[in-house]
Image (cartoon, rainbow, N blue to C red):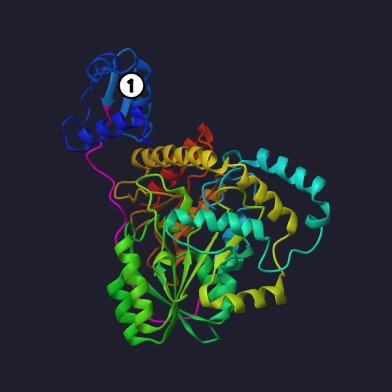
């Protein structure tokens, strides 16, 4: 539910963007706006603090609040991407370098999309791990064979009802994070040399898997707000023998885009028409912050061709490695392949996660995390507006906790990453999200961090470094 101070801030921001309050103009005083809105002074102070974080206004001591200079140069979302022909993956080495950098604690991590421990319910998890290890030792210290712990699968089946997917626990396979879910589904439905279609840009893990399995990738033009182009995908399917389409359905990595319900239906119908399968990655799905989308492609799947994948890595714990897939008519193949490779994730984590979900505290945690992510996204966009070079473009995602930033073309993102390292800042260059070079002036930023002066200063420094490259 939207808070009152945020509603007031949103309305003031809209007035500023429409020119009702011009650059450098003083906005109503805290006391005056409090009387106009019939709300407390504390509420107005919160609203103005949020507008400062977003970069709309600035305060002058003993004078009041003023519209920030340059606010009329509104930051636009990045442009739509273009596609290409099927190609071998060429970015694996770059991806590996990026992942290695994430383990350096001396860097301010604005790169890897890993939520900070402070945003996770780790104390609650500690309690449940201790309980199950003490009272269920016979089960938790033994193998938990595929498809995984049935009570956990039942909890997930209940949660899937929220997005219109009516499935049974027997339809679900617990995996070692979402990465294994994607890997199992892809491996069971392709052979070396096959072609898979992905968004452009796409989650770099799709490219890694394609490289490992010897697959060719064709990138489909994608809108950074509304997702993959159905028309472009249709043309690609008519021209190439594509086996699988891999997409993020809600709050895509890296763009933050979501596929509308109408487009979800169209994609499933398209897959049925060309008799192909879809791997749906919904790992950020529960982190909707603005008019959250309550449907997924799997909802419209009537013949088992959509293989839904997700995990608790972005909402509960990256290290627990609890993911799952609803692989449709590939379930038997997925279960058998998992038995031959990893058996299943470790039992103690499955039991602990089950107890955590059964307490009912997860929804409260999600509400808190969504609110934190929304504030952090607003603050980061405000810092980008204030410090990054003219011509920078960034979309405002409706969920998740990452920002896709398009810098002026003169700025090389890999070079910016290098000089960022030298200044103690870790970012992710856009190059790793595509087989092409069209995103070499893009970066992805992680908002899943507690806001601090260090984060603010790191963004300021990053903007200075980018500006120096012009």
**Residue 432 image point, x, y percent:** 49, 64
Task: Give the residue drawn at x 42%, y 40%.
Answer: 374
Q: How many marks?
A: 1
Quadrant occupied by the N terminus = top left
**Residue 84 image point, x, y percent:** 36, 77
Q: Which residue is mark 1?
A: 44
Q: How would you classify the magenta stretch by its main secondary structure?
A: loop
SS category of the residue bearing label 1: helix
What is the magenta range? 67-92
Q: Is residue 36 magenta?
A: no
315 relative position to 219: left or right: right
**Residue 362 image point, x, y percent:** 56, 43
Task: Give the residue drawn at x 26%, y 24%.
Answer: 66
Nearest the viewer among 189 and 170 is 170
Residue 245 seen in the figure:
yes
Q: Is residue 412 above or below residue 266?
A: above
Q: Is residue 303 above or below residue 359?
A: below
Q: Is residue 363 above or below residue 249?
A: above
174 relative position to 162: left or right: right
Disc 1: CA contacts within 10 A as few (<14), some (14-19) or many (>=20): many
Task: Give the residue drawn at x 29%, y 50%.
Answer: 391
**Residue 442 image point, x, y percent:** 40, 57
Residue 401 seen in the figure:
no
Q: Is residue 75 magenta?
A: yes
Task: Give the residue drawn at x 67%, y 64%.
Answer: 148
């Amino acid at each position: 539910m939207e808070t009152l101070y945020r509603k007031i801030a949103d309305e003031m921001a809209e007035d500023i963007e429409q020119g009702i309050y011009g650059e450098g103009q003083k906005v109503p005083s805290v006391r005056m706006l409090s009387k106009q809105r019939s709300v407390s002074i504390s509420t107005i102070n919160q609203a103005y603090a949020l507008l400062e974080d977003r970069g709309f206004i600035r305060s002058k001591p003993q004078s009041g609040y003023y519209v920030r200079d340059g606010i009329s140069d509104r930051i636009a979302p990045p442009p739509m991407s273009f596609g290409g022909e099927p190609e071998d993956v060429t970015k694996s080495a770059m991806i590996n370098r990026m992942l290695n950098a994430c383990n350096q604690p001396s860097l301010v991590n604005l790169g890897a999309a890993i939520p900070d421990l402070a945003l996770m319910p780790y104390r609650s998890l500690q309690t449940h791990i201790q309980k199950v290890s003490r009272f269920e030792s016979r089960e938790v210290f033994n193998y938990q064979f595929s498809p995984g712990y049935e009570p956990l699968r039942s909890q997930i089946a209940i949660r899937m009802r929220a997005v219109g997917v009516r499935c049974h626990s027997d339809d679900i396979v617990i995996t070692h994070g979402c990465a294994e879910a994607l890997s199992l589904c892809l491996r069971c439905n392709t052979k070396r040399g096959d072609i898979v279609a992905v968004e452009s840009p796409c989650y770099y893990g799709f490219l890694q898997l394609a490289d490992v399995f010897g697959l060719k990738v064709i990138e489909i033009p994608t809108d950074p707000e509304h997702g993959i182009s159905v028309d472009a995908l249709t043309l690609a399917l008519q021209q190439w023998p594509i086996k699988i389409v891999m997409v993020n359905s809600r709050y895509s990595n890296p763009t933050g885009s979501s596929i509308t319900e109408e487009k979800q239906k169209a994609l499933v119908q398209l897959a049925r028409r060309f008799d192909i399968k879809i791997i749906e990655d919904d790992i950020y799905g529960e982190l909707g912050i603005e008019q959250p989308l309550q449907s997924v492609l799997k909802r419209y799947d009537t013949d088992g061709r959509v293989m839904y994948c997700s995990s608790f890595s972005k909402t509960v714990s990256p290290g627990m490695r609890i993911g799952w897939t609803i692989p449709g008519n590939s379930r038997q193949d997925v279960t058998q392949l998992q038995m031959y490779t990893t058996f299943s994730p470790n039992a103690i984590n499955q039991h602990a996660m089950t107890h955590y979900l059964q307490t009912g505290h997860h929804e409260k945690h999600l509400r808190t995390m969504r609110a934190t992510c929304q504030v952090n996204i607003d603050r980061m966009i405000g810092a980008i507006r204030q410090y990054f070079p003219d011509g920078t473009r960034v979309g405002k995602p409706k969920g998740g906790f990452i920002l896709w930033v398009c810098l002026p073309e003169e700025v090389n993102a890999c070079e910016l990453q290098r000089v960022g390292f030298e200044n103690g800042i870790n970012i992710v260059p856009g190059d790793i999200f595509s087989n092409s070079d069209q995103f070499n002036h893009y970066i992805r930023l992680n908002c899943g961090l507690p806001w601090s002066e260090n984060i603010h200063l790191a963004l300021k420094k990053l903007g200075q470094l980018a500006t120096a490259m012009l």
